[in-house]
Image: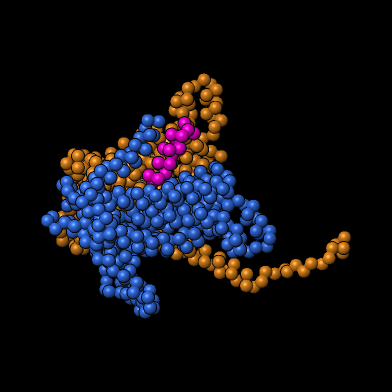
Chain colours: A blue, B orange
Amino acid sequence: MVVSVGLVVMLALLLWVLADGGWRAIREFGLHFIIGRDWNPVSGRESYGALPFIFGTAVTSLIAMVLAMPIGVGVALFLNESGSAWIKNPLAVLVDLLAAIPSVVYGIWGLFVLVPLFDHTVQPWMSASIGKVPIIGDLFTFNGPGGDIFTAGVILAIMILPIVTAVTREVVSVVSSETREGAMALGATRYETIRLGVLPTARPGIIGAGMLGLGRALGETIAVALVIGNSTRITASLFNPGYTIPAVIANEFREATSAGVHRSALLFLALLLVLIALGMATVSRLLVRRTTRLLGGDVAAQEEAATSTLGMA
Amino acid sequence: MSATVPAIEVPRTISSQRRTKDRIFSIALWASVVIALIPLLLIVYRVVRLGLAAVSVSLFAHTALPANMAGGGMKQAFLGTAMIVGIAIVISVPLGVLTGIYLSEYGSGRIASVVRFTAEILLSIPSIVAGAFIWALVVVALGSFSGLAAGVALTVIMWPIMARATEEVLRLVPTELREGGLALGYPRWRVIMRVVLPTAGAGVLTAIMLAVARGLGETAPVLLTALGNDFVNTNPMKPTDAVPLRVYNYVQSAYPAWRALAWGGALMLLLGVLVLSVTARMLSIRQQRRMR
């Protein structure tokens, strides 16, 4: 038991160390830290405005979620509601394998394969088509090759797909078979059963799955650092380079090892990141739990689903 | 009898509009599965193809050559990863397994639910944050980046994974076995040691393997704590190299020879992680079958 409580102590210590380390930055820069756009660690001209990183993190994660949610839910529904076991089980394992791939492997693939592909075909094409549409067109202006926010979002979408799928499956699997059979008995097609029976009941849990995915996307470091282009300019186009909170920590911690505002600023960013991620995880967990409990599903089945979620994620 | 029932017009067919919607929906589900699997295939294909080209004896037997010379290897990175992951295993296995035992065998009280919840949300901690935490705590305190700090940083990530996974496999052990042991007059801890753990056996190993698979591939926490090293280092208190780290550095280099090595390293990482995950998965499926 002592050992187990250690886990709680560790979390508390983590929050305390980051808060204590980040205190100095927030005291010196206050609100400017969050809304300022100028990030300059050069001593003598130091200024820490973290808005470019906050912006980049939010935008890449949102792109990831918008792309991963429909596909993740689709895969989960496929694996739970249709198809036969001989095809479902291997498919489930394959999707889970996406979660096992190390992020640096995503990074090397992203930088050498996805970035050139997007530069030469996808982005010029999107820019020439959607880019012409008024108002939203600005989001898709192509300004030349190199890493960018959009590519980072796509990589993140691939990376969070397994967790979105796993949690959605967990929720959908406890929608009781009565709901399903009832709808079928009324003559509903499979589409109607899912659309009118399964999805509304499972909705809070599916939102929870999305939030967990968003939390994962926010904190992903290495793959994003390699493909996003690392630029602190905030621009309208998604095809321009950006920067994220984890990426700046990974790139600048070396210069910030000596005590100073720079170190403090990075630790404060880490604190910000962990608070958002923990908030997302907590709300998501509660939503999923409420859904599964509300439906009074088989507890053992839930536990099992949770294991498989855990196992690979 | 059937003649007395007023005839109700029961449509025998589903309207074509509904049928079309259902058809489109099925296609959409299939499409999402295909879209989900395409990246997996592309990544594995590319890494295997370019990685195999870079794998040779020298990848494991030599350290880096000067920048633009072909050949060379990342021996120091493999040794460093072995050391860092070894340290992480030594620290996190006892912590993780004990926490799992506590949650499964004594875990009905209030404290246990707090611990369980903490473990659950710790799973969502961004790995770079674990790195920043240990960087601020250990690296700054010791005044040097080190393999030890990296091992501790990986522990932050592996402990909760192992705890939750161990809890789940121990819960699969039938209650009757525990009751049998207790009825024979064994104290609780002996029942756990002699009955529960041996029965779960391979399951606990699965939990450990999953956590190791995760730790093996982590780059960000190792970057912030071990820093990297161009040479072989066996002192756990000094900066140490690791495979994910070396791949990350070489990916960003301008030299083709180093980029080629990066693909070789990436292939080794992918192989290690996939072998561990798939073996763990197969063990756990077999285990669950045996328990039922």
B25 vs A310, left or right, is: right
Estimate the x, y position of residue B214 in percent, counting from the top left.
Answer: 35, 47
Quarter of the rendering containing residue B212: top left
For residue A7, above or below residue B263: above
Q: Can residue A148 be seen in this view?
A: yes
Q: Which residue is drawn at 16% across and 41% down?
A: B143
Q: Can residue B66 be seen in this view?
A: no
Residue A115 falls within the magenta-colored stretch? no
Closer to the camera in the image, B123 or B182: B123
B242 vs A139, left or right, is: left
Estimate the x, y position of residue B291 in percent, counting from the top left.
Answer: 53, 38
Residue B110 falls within the magenta-colored stretch? yes
Q: Which residue is drawn at 25% across and 47% down?
A: A22
For residue B76, above or below residue A128: above
The extreme left residue here reads A44
* Quarter of the image with the N terminus of chain A in it: top left
Estimate the x, y position of residue A224 in percent, counting from the top left.
Answer: 30, 59
Estimate the x, y position of residue A121 in percent, counting from the top left.
Answer: 34, 74
Q: Residue at x 68, y 62 (%)?
A: A187
For residue A156, above or below residue B176: below
Secondary structure mostly seen in the magenta stretch: helix
Point out the stretch of residues depicted in magenta. Answer: B106-124
Closer to the camera in the image, A182 or B35: A182
